[in-house]
Image (cartoon, rainbow, N blue to C red):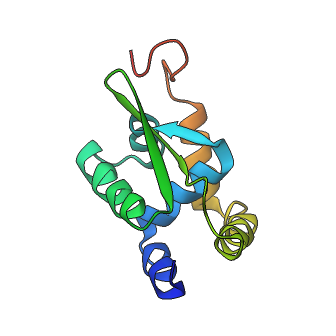
Amino acid sequence: MLETDLFKQLSDATRLRCLMLLIAEGELCVCELTHALGLSQPKISRHLAHLRQADLVQDRRVGQWIHYRLHDNLPGWVRAVLDATATELNRRSEYVADRQNLCSMPNRPGSACCA
């Protein structure tokens, strides 16, 4: 991955917020991201597609639900940049609010996603 590709992805606020939640949680369903960020499913899915095309995230399908996580094969320098970014941003109010929104999600995935 080229550094310009990484920083292009990080320059979008929605993609950055998605990545910070994925770093904090490990893996999230699209419905969890839409709830946490208060954005529409098509918008979240479009941004996740960008992140997937850049090989920053990978997905897995469980029935009709798609779950995302950081890509298993991220270069070490990319992971270091993401971890350093998360360390700083996860203290800021907008990112704290995203995590609180996620925690308050009713029927959060477990046995059934977004029931």
Place residue 51 in its image quadrant. Answer: bottom left
Image quarter for residue 50? bottom left
Question: Which residue is at a point 60% across and 33% down the rendered structure image?
Answer: 103
Among all residues in the image, which is located at the extreme front? 73
Relative image position of residue 7 (x, y in whole percent): 50, 81
Residue at 47%, 87% in the rendered image = 4
Above/below status of 90 relative to 28: below
Picture coordinates of residue 60, whole percent (x, y): 44, 36
Residue at 68% x, 75% y is: 81
Q: In the rendered picture of this protein, how many numbered marks are placed on residues?
A: 0
Relative height, residue 106 to residue 15 (above, below): above
Image position of 7 with respect to 103: above or below = below
Q: Is residue 26 left or right of residue 15?
A: right
* 46 to the left or right of 112: left
Q: Position of residue 101 (x, y in %)?
A: 54, 40
Q: Where in the figure is residue 77, as x and y percent of width and height?
A: 70, 76
Residue lying farthest to the bottom in this orientation: 4
Query: In what quadrant of the picture does the C terminus appear?
Result: top left
Quadrant assignment, res 73: bottom right
- Residue 110 sits above or below residue 87 on the image: above
